[in-house]
Amino acid sequence: MAGEKNVLIVAVPQRGALPPAVFELITAAKKAAAATGGTVSALVFGTKAADFAKQLGERGAEKVLTVSDAAYDSFVDEAYAAATAAAAKQEAAGVLLLAASVAGRSLAARLSVLLKAGVAAEICEISGSGGALSAKRYQYGGNIVAEVAFKSDVKILTVQPMCFEAAPVEAGKAAQTTPLSVPAASAGAQVASFKADEAGEIDLGAAERIVSGGRGLGNADGFKLIRELAHTLGAAVGASRAVVDAGWIAYRHQVGLTGRTVHPKLYVACGISGQIQHLAGMASSANIVAVNTDPACPMMDIATLGVVGDVYEVLPVVISEIKKRRGA
Ligand SMILES: Cc1cc2nc3c(=O)[nH]c(=O)nc-3n(C[C@H](O)[C@H](O)[C@H](O)COP(=O)(O)OP(=O)(O)OC[C@H]3O[C@@H](n4cnc5c(N)ncnc54)[C@H](O)[C@@H]3O)c2cc1C
């Protein structure tokens, strides 16, 4: 597939639905296609593929390939990679875009081997013109910007959630949908069942609002208050490494250098001092509220709004005020 310029969006479903990050890929793909001069198509999986194709079409995807076999209802990277490689070949796609989710990262690695492709991981910007494509990746909370260029013919990009605007729904838009013929999934592994760890939990990576707790909570029980505020705001729950290491909350909630990188519209840091390793994962949040007893802590320096006080005094007042204003 030397030098192919078409762009393929790999729309990996999550728990039976398309995550918001997939709609952001449409915007990213249009930028990539403008640089390469190619077309954009998308690939969807599983028995809900026709519905996914409709959702992508309403948001401006022009062509969607469907792999509707029930074997693709659960994510198995081996089977997904084989189908994606077939789609890339059929569409003459030289650029593949995936959300930088756990599944997207895993799939990108496997596709890189299958397609002899270079991977630009967790990118936040796409640029280029005249057929060339490059991407930017923010590190250390945006203090370092790495510009990534490709040497390979096929280029794979995993895109950080919340970096591109989700393509809006446009009335009357629909995609041309084509079934992709792939050999029956023959992965060595298959998913027997799936049990969500905490039902209804909002995924940190794609969250527009996050309430995070740190050592200032004093103990694991403090997360009851964090969860209550998060629930009230419709937010995801984050944490500092200190409390993850202490076993107060699971690792998947960790924000920072060795945890998740997040870009929410609102990040509420409760009892988190703001060490550089934590800031590396959240400093690019649009609005930061710090609740801390120490007015001189580093989190206060980057906060949009700093509240000097004890989390156990401040949060109950905030929760009750929000509920009151909503008439609950
Ligand atoms: C290689 C490496 C990687 C790392 N990766 C990460 C990472 O990914 N993420 C991460 O978070 N850290 C990471 N760390 C750890 C990081 O350096 C800090 O130790 C950690 O972020 C501190 O967590 P904290 O802010 O919860 O705790 P502390 O630094 O102890 O801060 C607690 C804060 O709570 C405040 N406080 C105390 N009581 C209250 C109260 N009642 N109400 C309100 N405020 C109160 C205090 O004033 C203080 O500011 C890493 C470290 C290393 C060396």
Image (tube, rainbow, N blue to C red):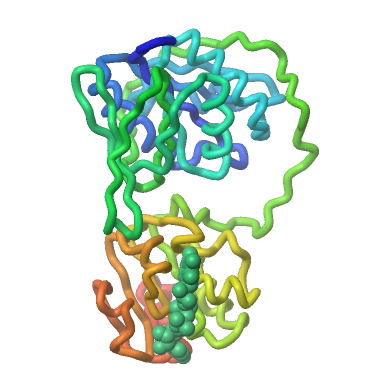
Image quarter of the C terminus: bottom left
Would residue 319 be visible to someone looking at this image? no
Residue 54 position (above or below residue 184):
below
Q: Which residue appears at 77% of the width and 27% of the height?
A: 188
Residue 72 placement: quadrant: top right
Q: Where in the figure is residue 211, as x and y percent of width and height? A: 44, 69
The quarter holding residue 119 reads top left
Which residue reaches farthest left?
130
In the displayed structure image, the side of residue 101 where residue 48 appears, left or right: right
Task: Name the residue rendered at 54%, 63% in the picture.
Answer: 253
- 223 relative position to 34: left or right: right
| Residue 16 as seen in the image, left or right of residue 303 | right
**Quarter of the view holding residue 111:** top right
- Residue 324 location (% of width, % of height): 39, 78
| Residue 4 location (% of width, % of height) | 37, 12
Q: Residue at x 57, y 58 (%)?
A: 201
Q: Quadrant of the N terminus?
A: top left
Please state which of residues 54 and 283 is positioned toward the viewer in this rendering: 283
Out of 74 and 103, give the one closest to the viewer: 103
Say whether residue 26 is visible.
Answer: yes
Q: Nearer the viewer, residue 167 or 296?
A: 296
